[in-house]
Image (tube, helix red, strand yellow):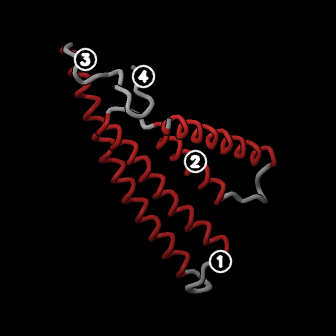
Amino acid sequence: MGGIVDKEEHHFSRTDNDWLIGKLNWVIGHSIRLLAILMVVVILFCIADVFFVLKEKLIAEPFLVLEFGDIFTVFASFLAVLIAIEIFANITLYLRDDVIHIRLVIATALMAIARKVIVLDFTTISADYVFAIAAVILALGITYYLVASKART
């Protein structure tokens, strides 16, 4: 029961003999497949955005030069693509195994918060905001460590 940690059976078993539950599971399964397709569309748009941002930054004055702020904008675009790919991996693993791979979900969250840290403009945010992000990173890091440790045992 549960279906939240690796290798456990999902509590919405596809082998259930109830007709209604079987049909509802079919709808959910196809909905997840649709989400996977839509995520690929999002990834393609994100990749197009990376090209667009890079092109815009390179054709602006000074020509073919990326300034410090421009580099962070390009990095943010790249990281958005990587996060979308991680979310796609979460969806496809769920489709394949019918469980939520908690370690991958936590790793995706860590990547998302790392993206936030990389693109932060420390001149415009408060110290409380920085401490809050640090707390989230610490909590996710500890959680990832504990989940990974439990998986090794």
Amino acid beneath label 1: Glu
Disc 1 versus disc 3: nearer the observer: 3
Q: Position of residue 80 (x, y in %)?
A: 50, 56
Q: Nearer the viewer, mark 3 or mark 2?
A: 2
Name the quarter where the N terminus is drawn.
Answer: top left
The amino acid marked with disc number 4 is: Gly
116 vs 24: above or below: below
Q: Say which amino acid is labelled 3.
A: Ile
Among the two numbered marks 4 and 1 on one chain, the one whose residue lies closer to the N terminus:
4
Q: Which residue is mark 4?
A: 2
Alpha-carbon span between mark 1 and mark 3? 57 Å
Location of mark 2 (residue): 110
Crowd tier of the residue under label 2, counting other residues whose Cα lies within 10 Å: few below 14, some 14–19, many 20 or above:
many
- 60 or 45: which is nearer to us? 45
Q: Mark 4 vs mark 3: which is more N-terminal? A: 4
Percent across and percent down for residue 111 are 55, 51
